[in-house]
Image (cartoon, rainbow, N blue to C red):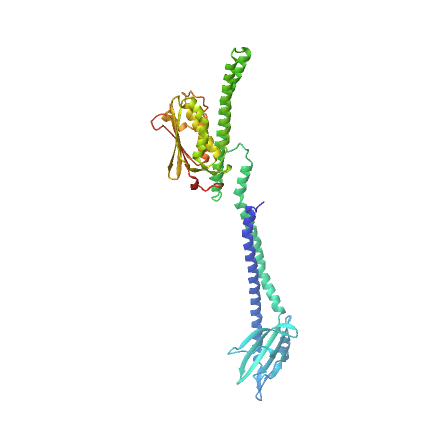
Amino acid sequence: MRTDSLRRQLLKGLLWPLSIILLAGSVFAYYFALNSAVNAYDLGLLNDALDISKQLEIKQGRMALNLPPAAHQMLQTNNQDRVSYAAWDEYGQIFSGNPKLQMADMLVSEESHIFQDMELNGEKHRAMLLRGKEDGHVYYIAVAQTVHGRDKLTGEIFAGILLPEALLAIVSIAAILLGVGRGLSPVVHLRDEISSRSSNDLRPIEESTAPAELAPIIHGINALLENLAASFASHRRFIADAAHQLRTPLAALSGQIEVALEEPPSDKKELLHQLLATTRRTTHLANQLLSLARLEHTEQFMYEVAAVDLQKVLQETAADFVTFSARKGIELDFDTYTCRVAGSPLMLRELISNLLDNAVRYTPSGGRIRVSMEMIAQHVFLAVEDNGPGVPAAELFRLGTPFHRLPSDQAEGCGLGLAIVREIARLHGAEIEFGRGTDGRGLKVRIGFPLAFNLHLSGLA
């Protein structure tokens, strides 16, 4: 399933908040424009009411309003709006103007004037009620005006505010698009550099010019490329060594057959024994090459792990070497007990088989091989030691290297057994040590496996 690109996620994260801010700004701008227009028109209504109050007179104890005709005309037509007024005394007696305005809310407390919206003749008006006193007489003056002019002024103010805000929004969006594009350019450059490389180009990517956010990613890619380069180099060396190792027995086998064809031996049985021995050596070498190749390209997650009884696997595997060791007069001694380790039964069987095979091959007749187990700090250590010729101290660190053999080796080995043991130990997270036997002779291989309950592994029984 395709996920959103980083560019899309960044734009969503920036444009959505910007849109909300712009929308909120537009709402605030509208209310600001409306409030400004309302205040301006309310001030005009107040001035009209005060002007009207100046024309009040007291005649024979009663209030009257004497407005000139010009004042009447001005009140009735104020630009595109119509204005109405009314005046009454404290007893509610209208003495001038439109009686319908007397329906306006009455003032409370000590308020001298109040503004309100009202309907008049089916049309929306803005009204103002003024209370005053003249020669001891309380009077009320109401002035109402249609809101066409106020709405127009509101629109003009709103447009005046909205236009710069719209331009600012356009500039902000353009800046975000440009900034995101420029900010992601190193990612695009990294993508192009990786995609343009061939499968054989494992050069590290330049880290010094990369942004700080990409540096860990590039560092990880470079580490992966370095591991791949080392793996490919190891693979090439393995192929070269394997070709060299296979060439020798195959050449010997081919030579024996050619000699037999040119000069058939009198003892065909001896020839068949020689061919069989050479074929077995070649088969053994090919099997170990295939095992090592498979193990070198295997990781822990590629095989199923279970809680394995190491003693049981050891007993089953050692049974195959009893006859082999007895034929050479070698004594096999076991000091083991039941314990469970986390691992692959098949791989552990192959590890033990290679350890015993290596020990039996290099131990002379009449020798002794001891297999023991020891538990230390949540680990069980499997040790296989012999009293054979041993390995010089300077050569111990090279044990486990594919095709490494000592110059004095006389056994029919190919230098792969301990390499297979090392790879299987690596896959099981085990520690491997090479040293001398307890009596100072021979070779001791010691491998420490974590106990099964000390690991959290899928498939653990």
Task: Check the image and name the residue furthest to the left.
Answer: 439
Residue 374 in the image: x percent, y percent?
A: 38, 35
Task: Tell me: residue 431, above or below residue 105.
Answer: above
Residue 44 in the image: x percent, y percent?
A: 57, 72
Task: Tell me: residue 213, above or below residue 16.
Answer: above
* Front one among 430 and 244: 430
At x 54%, y 14%, the residue is: 258
Task: Tell me: residue 148, above or below residue 276.
Answer: below
* Front one among 363 and 104: 363
Location of residue 49 by image quarter: bottom right
Location of residue 335 by image quarter: top left
At x 60%, y 79%, the residue is: 102
The quarter of the picture where the N terminus appears is top right
Residue 377 in the image: x percent, y percent?
A: 37, 39
Count of numbered labels shown in the rendering: 0
- Can residue 244 be seen here? The reply is no
- Can residue 394 be seen here? The reply is yes
* Front one among 93 and 188: 188
Task: Check the image and name the residue furthest to the bottom.
Answer: 60
Task: Check the image and name the residue furthest to the right.
Answer: 122
At x 51%, y 23%, the residue is: 283
* Front one among 389 and 57: 389
Location of residue 103 by image quarter: bottom right
Residue 9 in the image: x percent, y percent?
A: 55, 49
